[in-house]
Image (cartoon, helix red, strand yellow):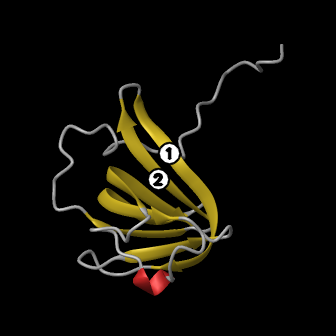
Amino acid sequence: MQSLYDLFPAHLAVAPAGLCELSEMTAFPPVDGAYRVEKSRVIVTDTHIIVARDTDAGPAVVFQERYSKFIKNTKDTDSYVMTTSGKLLAFRKDTNCGCGSRLRGWNPFTIMNSVNDPTE
């Protein structure tokens, strides 16, 4: 997986399939019926969108799905994703700094390697 876009901190809105058209989506404020995710990190790879939030146990992926359409815009306007199942996501840069969040240094692509084969 290759990262195409990485946004932190982000305002994010997620709408179920069929709620509205992609052009009607807004990250902040979200359209009626959309779920709002505050203080999140949005990563768009060449195949998936990954959304993470800071939890008591550390950074956690709260949404991950393949997408069929990605529209990247400037930091002052919304970017959009339509997933393969039809969910709509709109996101934009949050003006807060995200200070103190463990999401700033989090890397979802880190794979821990072991010296020994765990099947031995």
Say which quarter of the image contains residue 34: bottom left
Q: Is residue 75 above or below residue 94?
A: below
Q: Position of residue 102 (x, y in %)?
A: 31, 37
> Looking at the image, is 52 positioned above or below residue 12?
above
Which residue in the protein does label 1 denote?
62
Which residue is at a point 68% across and 67% down the rendered structure image? Answer: 85
Mark 1 touches mark 2? (CB < 8 Å): yes
Residue occupied by mark 2: 51
User: In this rendering, would 87 be left or right of 94?
Assistant: right
The x, y position of residue 50, in whole percent, is: 52, 55
Q: From this view, report whether residue 75 is shown above or below residue 100.
A: below
Q: Quadrant of the C terminus?
A: top right
* Secondary structure found at label 1: strand
Q: Secondary structure at mark 2?
A: strand
Residue 101: numbered disc? none
Total numbered badges shown on the rendered structure: 2
Query: Going 59% across and 37% down the picture, which residue do you hit?
Result: 111
* Cα–Cα gap, marks 1 and 2: 6 Å
Residue sitting at x 46%, y 63%: 14
